[in-house]
Amino acid sequence: MGFRIVVIKNRSKLDLKMDYLVCRSSETYSVFIPEISTLILESTAISLTCALVSELIKNNVKIIFCDEKHNPESELVSYRNSYNSSKKIKQQIMWSEDVKKEVWSRIIKDKIMKQSQLLSERKHEIESKMLIDYSQHILSNDITNREGHAAKVYFNALFGMSFSRRNEHQINSALNYGYAIILSCFNREIVKMGYMTQLGIWHRNEFNAFNLSCDLMEPFRILVDKLVLNLDADKDMKSQMLEIFNLKVKINNKLQVLENAITIYCQSVIDALNKNDANLIKFYEL
């Protein structure tokens, strides 16, 4: 599995030479494709060949395209996945509503507990205790929307009472950028396992191609939030946010880099859904 995050920011032409990605701009340089984990194209003035795209997909490289404002806008999701994906999609369609509700409740509880932990680290003890209380009163499928109540308390404590996720400012830009990067990791993992990102367990928006990814990524949003809180205003925001790939978390009693942790976690959630046992989910520790 690749380990390099390659970011192309300026007008360039990308093509394939042997097993290398060749970038031609003011300078020319090459990167060995099997070493690449993610390719982020930040400029709309970048061109690339179909031969290169095909080779990147064969090597399971995430390819993320950005818009004219350099924000992630789309990604390539490969048709290449598990050899028995048809069987797995049938399983996915047959997941019981009861187990989906239980799995979603566990995911939301873990997310809120991690939010509470971050608030405590930032000395927001009153709000942290409020979130603990919310987590203890989550009903099946979170029908009382404890997640929404917790989010309001959480973001207002971290970024101020006037903060709204709908506002256009630097904090939201950084959060959105980080969440988009995390989402792409989940998209790749779910497709690699042979399942459909469109069929979620709670998110069911007909216009969202990544409903299941949005479900599973919820507890990992806190990692993005922590990075945003520690951004250096004198340095490039996007470069700092890409440090998320270097994070290590404890999961299944071992310290793992983020992408490995996502693999372990996703597989455990899928096992829980297939075996009707939410206790199989393996959550990471901050």
Image (cartoon, grey):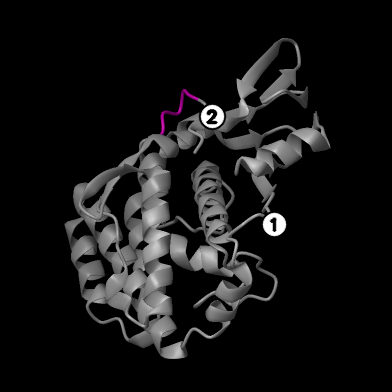
Three-letter residue code for mark 1: Tyr
Residue 64 shows in the view: no
The question of residue 10 being in magenta is answered with no
**Secondary structure mainly formed by the magenta segment:** loop
Q: State yes or no: discs 1 and 2 in contact (Cβ < 8 Å).
A: no
Callout 2: SS: helix
**Residue 7 falls in which quadrant of the image?**
top right
Quarter of image, res 275: bottom left
| Res. 103 in view | yes
Between residues 198 and 164, which one lies in front from this camera angle? Answer: 198
Corner quadrant of residue 161: bottom left
Q: Say above or below: 5 vs 59.
A: above
**Which residue is located at x 57 percent, y 69 percent?**
211
The foreground one among 229 and 262 is 262
What is the crowding at mark 2: few (fewer than 14 residues within 10 Å), some, or many (at least 20)? Answer: some
Q: Position of residue 184 (x, y in %)?
A: 56, 51
Please, which residue is most extreme toward the front here?
83
Please tell me how crowded label 1 is: few (under 14), some (14-19), or many (20+) other residues with Cα within 10 Å.
few
Is residue 51 toward the left or the right of residue 221 in the image?
A: right
Name the residue carrying label 2: 35
Residue 46: percent from left, percent from top: 78, 30
Task: Choose the circle earlier in sequence order: 1 or 2.
Answer: 2
The structure residue drawn at horizontal position 25% and vertical position 53%, both measured from the top left corner, is 285
| Of 232 and 202, the residue lying toward us | 202
Q: Is residue 125 above or below residue 257?
A: below
Region of the chain picked out in magenta, as a range? 231-235
Indicate whether 263 appears above or below 243: below
Furthest-top residue in view? Answer: 27
Residue receiving disc 1: 79
Q: Label 2 amino acid?
A: Glu
